Image (cartoon, rainbow, N blue to C red):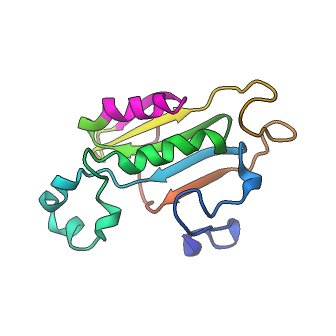
Amino acid sequence: ARRNVGGLGQVHEGDLFAPLPERLLGRVDVLLANVPYVPSADVELLPAEARVHEPRVALDGGGDGLDVMRRVAVEAPRWLAPGGSLLVEASERQRGAAVEVLRGAGLSPRVVVCEELYATVVIGTAGARAPGGPWPRPESGRAGLGSVEIGSGGGRGCDD
């Protein structure tokens, strides 16, 4: 991440949201979480290029594959600016459960599928918060702080 970001931003290393500075609470427009989503029982069924060359922690998402997504979703609304979005990848068969995870966290979910890359992305958008609501608001609306990425990944993708 440091090499990719270069001088264009900052990298904070640690467990999910723990290393992020509190000044970002309620101010993040885009939160990209590259969470593991393979169910524990299915990790051994993955192709060797994934199973052998990736650490298990990068693949194993727990019993149904959504354990880490749940951890991210429950905290994301505190960090997102009003109208900000959390993006997470899931498998096609997890689509409905992943939508419910984001809905349960108070986000408005939608799904984007990229057939070319066999990718299913679940997007949860934070609604507007009432003044004095439970999460801090930026001093002057959306602060334009850009995005925060949790996890690793990158490369090519679909346009939507």
Task: Judge from the rendering whether residue 142 lies leftward or rightward of residue 158; answer left or right.
Answer: right
Q: Residue furthest left?
A: 45
At which x and y percent is residue 54? 29, 70
Q: Residue furthest right?
A: 140
To which quarter of the image does residue 88 belong? Answer: top left
Locate the N terminus by quadrant: bottom right
When the figure is inspected, residue 148 is found, relative to residue 118, above or below; the finding is below
Q: Which residue is at 52% across, 50% downward? A: 32
When the figure is inspected, residue 120 is found, relative to residue 11, above or below; the finding is above
Q: Which residues are magenta?
A: 95-113
At which x and y percent is residue 11? 62, 68
Task: Judge from the rendering whether residue 151 lies leftward or rightward of residue 95; answer left or right.
Answer: right
Q: Which residue is at 31% across, 53% downward? A: 61
To which quarter of the image does residue 141 belong? Answer: top right
Could you say which is closer to the camera, residue 122 or residue 40? Answer: 40
Number of marks present in the image shown:
0
At which x and y percent is residue 107? 54, 30
Could you say which is closer to the camera, residue 31 or residue 78? Answer: 78
Q: Which residue is at 50% across, 41% downward? A: 73
Q: Which residue is at 71% across, 60% downward? A: 21
Task: Judge from the rendering whether residue 99 lies leftward or rightward of residue 94; answer left or right.
Answer: right
At which x and y percent is residue 135? 72, 37
Residue 92 covered by magenta stretch = no
Could you say which is closer to the camera, residue 113 or residue 133? Answer: 133
